[in-house]
């Protein structure tokens, strides 16, 4: 008997589907969330968003409040970033997701975003989990850097226990001894979470690998293991990105992948939940 | 050139000493922080606090807001717990430390406690770090479960960068593959942090081992490696503790250790910073 | 500049193809190696081998010399096991692979097997690597439990440096903090090794997950990430297997997967080296 | 009930003492094993050995057969190295320890050395363990890079089960995510092994930290946690060492430590087994 209840398949057999705009995450066809790590510049973001929409991307991502390891790194544009992201989404016709790092920003983030992202460093920020559990709003919960599957599912349980059922899990790689990659993408976790829980799961191979050349092979792997979607960092000019350049795809790379995906998704063997 | 500045020994040669009541953490003689994992019951806590004071313990610990992995576990007594802890400290004549888990609780915690504890799960809750950086109050910053030394020192840098210089670091074990122990106490980190930084460091072998029989050997080791103090869980009746029973010392075990310590501390070889 | 030479793609652009019987590992279509963890009983193995052959499995696996964590666990049938494995392979018309654990067994293993397996625990048994580097015989080199990609590729370099170019790499999961799975299958390693090296790579999701229900989803993922084949444990009666029962597929489960695979392999998006 | 028998304290209460020359490892006073990582040059080694003897070092270490990650690194002087090491020990009046990496070298190593070292990479080279279990000769068994305590004790059990009771365990650090140090010295393992087993344990803080400035603080910690001795790398000219220079102490640093130790050892609080 696992210690979690509401998130488990024993409690609910059928997959939970989270609707965002006209995208249905968990309903079968892979959902693709893409965008820059951080919102940097309005004109760039609007152009990129429109290009992503044309490729078939479903949701626009962009960080406004950035949790950075160093206090001396770019911390994001804050409220201005939220506004720019929302505008870019509106112009392109894409719903948007952004990270919430402080309970006091919740009203603001709910006003501008369509999905609230809880980052890895806040996976066990239980006060934040309880607050997003009390709003009627989709939440994407990233796995902590060294969280076990049980701890991750219990973090989701905190949100469901407060009443919010619209939770999407996101595997983004765990911390290990390997130095070639930024993190170790845990493919076992993708298969195991789909087996243990009814919640939809998206994969973030950008953080999961930290290297552009590995992002798409691992993205394909995640879908083959049963992921319901992908979260990908893309930047028109990765060399000059203010953060995460080395793991950001170029728009043209993503465009090719989106075509493959639309061709292959329906035929590629999927795990049956 | 490390990415942190204010916390580094290059920036400040001499050890920082944090004064709490008449205890001076970092000044040489080991400081001992002890108490139950969670504040459970007023009468028990007052009795325990007085007993700890008589043994020579310097600071009383006790959790009021408990970050628990499961939403269904005991979450602490909250504000009542803070009041009970403060009363027990006053009666026994001990300053008290308790964990802050939410920026909104800061005024309350500052009112009742003498040291603010930031737990492992919040080591990279940067909004919380910035807020405690803006108060003039001692802060004990626990290392995250899988934080590198650099990430830990940068988390401390967030606090110092906001103006608060009274930071105590706490090594409490990292997550690894070993299943016999709850965590892997990182003795290298004790020696390395004393080498890299001027901030005082205390060791928490209770969480660092998770097993009563290992707590005191590892406590001795931490002091021999250069730790400025210890944080120990003690409970009059570990079998019935609401949390962390298996790693809690019995008062009589701690009493014997405190005697050894007062005898040995001055003579035991110490690392020179 | 990586420290390895002969194994790197800089040294040799085109994929190395290792021929075993009429199977060409690294040539495109996924190679499937399957069989029980250990050779236990001749009649059972012959029956299983014939069934595997009918499913389209290419190579038969079976352990004769078993490296076991405890001296009190079943250590394998040794030379008898080799003979039984070879006979089963001959009857079924399948080449066979078995593990070499001692330099002194090399002539014997070369006499009975078609591929020499070097297990995870011997990945850095450099004397063993040098010896298999001096024979003209295919070698499957499993990744060590906590070997970095560089250490793994350098272990292969030991073999190539002695003259043997027929090396197949095998990702079988790394050791981490997760307790739900036996190991953490490193999908990044699959993509990265195909990028860094010209050597063929097979995936072992049986050890990589340790749980039957996760083996096939992770097998699909490995192929989608670019693996050239799979190594799968299968047992007619996992409940009674002398080792690795919980991670062994049932023959009927493997049969269904082999059909999917023959249908999907050519169409599933593959990473281009 | 642990899976190991002969190595456990349940099976034998009193500490096992291994005699080497007139040093008794496990009898109380810390035994110090010191020397260069690899045997490089006869004159240098003889001079160093005599200096170590004068400091009070008990056993001389030096590698002749070196297991190196890369086939292109210095592999040791082999049989010549063994002879040089034995001569240096004889001249200085010190017993010697060296690593065995191949079952075929066993007679040769037994002829020249006083203790056989089994390195981390061979901790689960079970054929090697069985062979050293069949000789009547002291064996130092290093812990594997990612071996659990149970796996390590079971590896020792392989040796005892073959009849050889003279086993010394050596904690040398485990592999983790930290990049500042070479390995993570596991102080919990020191305390736990002394609790679980009657075998003597020595600590290798040179490999356990990988940094000269951390070696002695961690050495003190290991003794405080209950270690029966230390294994230290020392080199007259670390900058020019063929291997492990950055973690090698200078003779003058070791000399000061040996004096502290002789002063402090008897008084420093020790864990009672």
Image: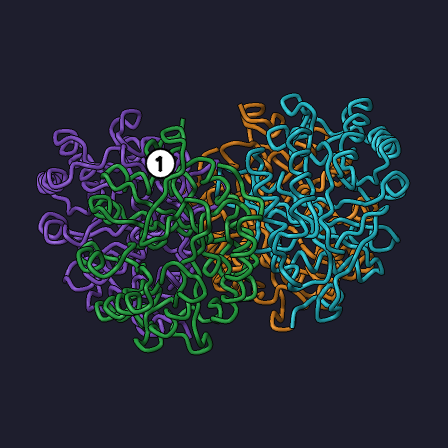
Chain colours: A cyan, B orange, C green, D purple
The quarter of the displayed image where residue A191 is located: bottom right
Residue A56, percent across and down? 76, 39
Judging by the rendered image, the residue that carries numbered circle 1 is C7
Please, what secondary structure does the residue beneath circle 1 have? Answer: loop
* Front-most of residues D50 and C147: C147
Which residue: 40% across, 34% down? C14
- Residue at image x 48%, y 71%? C250
Residue C145 coordinates in the image, percent (x, y)? 41, 52
Mark 1 packing: few (<14 Cα in 10 Å), some, or many (20+)? many
Q: Which chain is indicated by disc 1?
A: C
Figure quadrant of residue B199: top right
Vertical relation: D161 (above or below) D118? below
Residue C59 horizontal side relative to residue A273, left or right: left
- Residue B182 point in image, percent of width and height: 54, 59
Q: Position of residue B23 (x, y in %)?
A: 63, 44
Q: Out of A32 and C74, give the one closest to the viewer.
A: A32
Q: Is residue A123 visible?
A: no
Q: Residue at x 45, y 55 (%)?
A: C230
């Amino acid at each position: 008997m696992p210690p979690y209840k509401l998130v488990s398949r024993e409690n609910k057999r059928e997959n939970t589907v989270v609707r965002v705009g006209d995208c249905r995450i968990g309903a079968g066809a892979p959902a693709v969330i893409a965008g820059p790590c951080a919102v940097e510049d309005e004109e760039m973001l609007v152009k990129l968003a429109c290009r992503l929409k044309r490729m078939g991307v479903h949701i626009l991502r962009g960080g406004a409040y950035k949790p950075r390891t160093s206090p001396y790194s770019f911390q994001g544009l804050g409220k201005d970033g939220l506004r720019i992201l929302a505008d870019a989404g509106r112009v392109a016709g894409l719903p948007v997701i952004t990270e919430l790092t402080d309970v006091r920003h919740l009203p603001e983030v709910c006003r501008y975003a369509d999905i609230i992202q809880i980052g890895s460093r806040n996976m066990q920020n239980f006060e934040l989990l309880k607050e997003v559990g009390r709003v009627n709003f989709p939440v994407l919960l990233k796995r902590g850097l060294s969280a076990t599957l049980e701890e991750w599912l219990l973090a989701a349980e905190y949100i469901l226990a407060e009443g919010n059922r619209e939770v999407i899990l996101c595997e983004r790689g765990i911390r290990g001894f390997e130095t070639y990659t930024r993190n170790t993408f845990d493919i076992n976790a993708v298969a195991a979470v789909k087996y243990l829980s009814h919640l939809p799961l998206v994969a973030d191979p950008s953080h999961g690998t930290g290297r552009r050349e590995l992002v798409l092979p691992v993205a394909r792997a995640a879908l083959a293991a049963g992921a319901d979607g992908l979260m990908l960092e893309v930047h028109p000019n990765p060399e000059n990105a203010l953060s995460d350049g080395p793991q950001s795809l170029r728009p043209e790379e993503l465009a090719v992948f989106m075509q493959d995906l639309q061709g292959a998704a329906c035929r590629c063997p999927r795990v049956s939940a």
